[in-house]
Amino acid sequence: MNTITTDVDTTTTTTTTTTTTVCYFPPPGRSCPTNIRDCSDNAESYCTDNKIDVSSRQECYDAAVDLGAAVYQYTSTNNLCKYNVDATTCDHEFETVSVTNNAQIYDIESTNGEDILCMTPALSSTASTTTTTTT
């Protein structure tokens, strides 16, 4: 009886692309200049003279949600509440400016809007790794 042995070479290539999502969490004192205070419905309790008038971050969040905001900021030193219905105007680090008060930009999608907004940093990275194994 004859036995035939065959060697088989197998090459496996694995490519892994990793996109690292690093957040820029704006510190107090950063603001998005496109955010506004305006509210057109004076019938709402948070609206005085067509401007949002609140006394807490929670009230600011509630008003921003009611106004259809995609992003909001609150300044506790003067109860200033601002928002924007277009998240793309305040989702990158370069879209923020330094202000002299403690304005804080929040993530409206977080529970009760309590989390600081994760913005795209000025620099982000993507890494790609290719591994070739021959057996």
Image: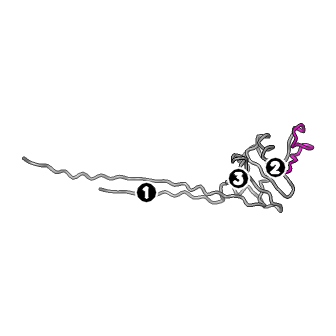
Q: Nearer the viewer, mark 3 or mark 1?
A: 3
Residue pictured at 49% horizontal, 57% vertical:
128
Residue at figure coordinates x 11%, y 49% from the top left: 3
Asked if 66 appears above or below 105 in the picture, the reply is above
> Would you name the residue on which mark 1 appears?
130
Mark 1 to mark 2: distance in Å? Answer: 46 Å
Q: Which residue is mark 3?
A: 115
Provide the residue span drawn in magenta: 41-57
| Amino acid type of the residue that numbered disc 1 sits on in the rendered structure | Thr
Q: Quadrant of residue 126?
A: bottom right
> Which amino acid type corresponds to the residue marked 2 in the rendered image?
Lys
Q: Is 18 on the left-hand or right-hand side of 54?
A: left
Neighbourhood count class around disc 3 (C-alpha, 10 Å): few under 14, some 14–19, many 20 upward: some
Dot 1 alpha-carbon crowd within 10 angstroms: few under 14, some 14 to 19, many 20 or more: few
Circle 2 is placed at which residue position?
82
Q: Are marks 2 and 3 in contact (CB under 8 Å)?
A: no
Position of residue 134 measured from the top left corner of the image (x, y, whole percent): 32, 56
* Residue 93 vs residue 61, the one in the foreground: 61
Judging from the image, what secondary structure is the residue with disc 1 in?
strand
Q: Residues within 10 Å of mark 2 (few under 14, many from 20)?
A: many
Under mark 3, the amino acid is Asp
Location of residue 71 with respect to 27 vertically, above or below = above
Q: Position of residue 75 (x, y in %)?
A: 82, 55
Could you tell me which secondary element the residue under label 2 belongs to? strand
Whether residue 47 is in magenta: the answer is: yes
Q: Which comes before the other along the chain, label 3 or label 1? A: 3
Q: Nearer the viewer, mark 2 or mark 3?
A: 3
Q: Height in image: 116 above or below 46?
A: below
Residue 104 within the segment the image draws in magenta:
no
Q: Could you say where residue 31 lies in the image, as x and y percent from the top left?
A: 78, 56
Q: Earlier in the sequence, mark 1 or mark 2?
A: 2
